[in-house]
């Protein structure tokens, strides 16, 4: 009889524990279903807050430019005063002075009748007769210098030569013709008043008459 009572108490305790476990499970399921467990967890352990921090990208700025270089102005050194002693050429100055101050003596006058050169004589051809008509129309004028050689009789010993032209070919040619035509009408050169052969120059002027 005692053994039976003992078994009844055992089963009763066992049954109560079983019911408690079942009730606990039912409570847990109800809490999960109703959100009570979530609230209890939030109270016990607050939610973890996560802040997203954006990484600030720093722009790489270029390095600052180097400071300007100031160039020092060149220092101008004045050239030294150099005195150059130039020798004075006294010899040259003396020569110039001597030349300028030296008086040239005039040649002694030739005695009368010593020597004379040849030239046009009496009845010598007239210049107007040999004036080229073309030069007259063009109003060309000039002086022709002719060189002649004459014998003691007043005749040409050789052909006359043009010593200095007038600048006009026709007048130069007319001057030579006139000098040639005057052969035999020249005054011969003289030596101590006596006619001798000799050479000389004379001028022939071609000039228009008004």
Image (cartoon, helix red, strand yellow):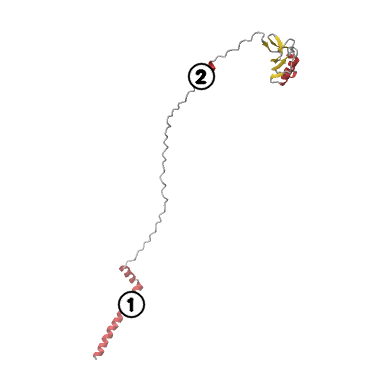
- At x 33% / y 77%, what residue is drawn? 25
44 on left or right of 116: left
Q: Image quadrant of residue 118? A: top right
Instruction: State the residue in front, 91 or 29.
Output: 91
Q: CA separation, marks 1 and 2?
A: 153 Å
- Marks 2 and 1: in contact by CB < 8 Å? no
How many other residues sit within 10 Å of disc 2, few (<14), some (14-19) or many (≥20)?
few
Residue 174: give x, y in percent of width and height. 73, 18
**Label 1 secondary element:** helix
Discs 1/2, front: 2
User: 46 above or below 95?
Assistant: below
Which residue is rendered at x = 27% and y = 84% of the image? Answer: 12
Q: Is residue 27 above or below residue 55?
A: below
User: Can residue 172 be seen in this snapshot?
Assistant: yes
Percent of width and height locating residue 71 = 42, 40
Q: Secondary structure at mark 2?
A: helix
Name the image quarter holding the C terminus: top right
- Farthest residue in the left direction? 2
- The residue tagged 2 is 94
Residue toward you, 205 or 117: 117
Q: Position of residue 57 (x, y in %)?
A: 41, 56
């Amino acid at each position: 009889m005692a053994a039976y009572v003992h078994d009844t108490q055992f089963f009763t305790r066992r049954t109560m524990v079983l019911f408690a476990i079942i009730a606990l499970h039912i409570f847990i399921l109800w809490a999960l279903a109703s959100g009570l467990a979530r609230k209890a967890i939030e109270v016990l352990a607050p939610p973890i807050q996560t802040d997203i921090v954006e990484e600030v990208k720093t722009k790489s700025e270029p390095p600052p430019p180097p400071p300007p270089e100031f160039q020092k102005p060149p220092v101008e050194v004045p050239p030294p005063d150099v005195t150059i002693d130039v020798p004075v050429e006294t010899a040259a100055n003396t020569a110039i002075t001597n030349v300028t101050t030296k008086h040239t003596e005039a040649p002694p006058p030739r005695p009368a009748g010593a020597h004379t050169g040849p030239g046009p004589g009496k009845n010598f051809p007239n210049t107007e007769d040999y004036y080229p008509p073309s030069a007259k129309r063009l109003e060309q004028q000039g002086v022709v210098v002719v060189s002649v050689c004459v014998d003691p009789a007043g005749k040409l010993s050789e052909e006359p030569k043009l010593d200095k032209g007038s600048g006009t070919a026709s007048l130069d040619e007319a001057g030579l013709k006139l000098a040639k035509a005057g052969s035999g009408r020249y005054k011969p050169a003289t030596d101590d008043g006596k006619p001798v052969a000799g050479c000389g120059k004379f001028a022939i002027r071609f000039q228009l008459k008004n």
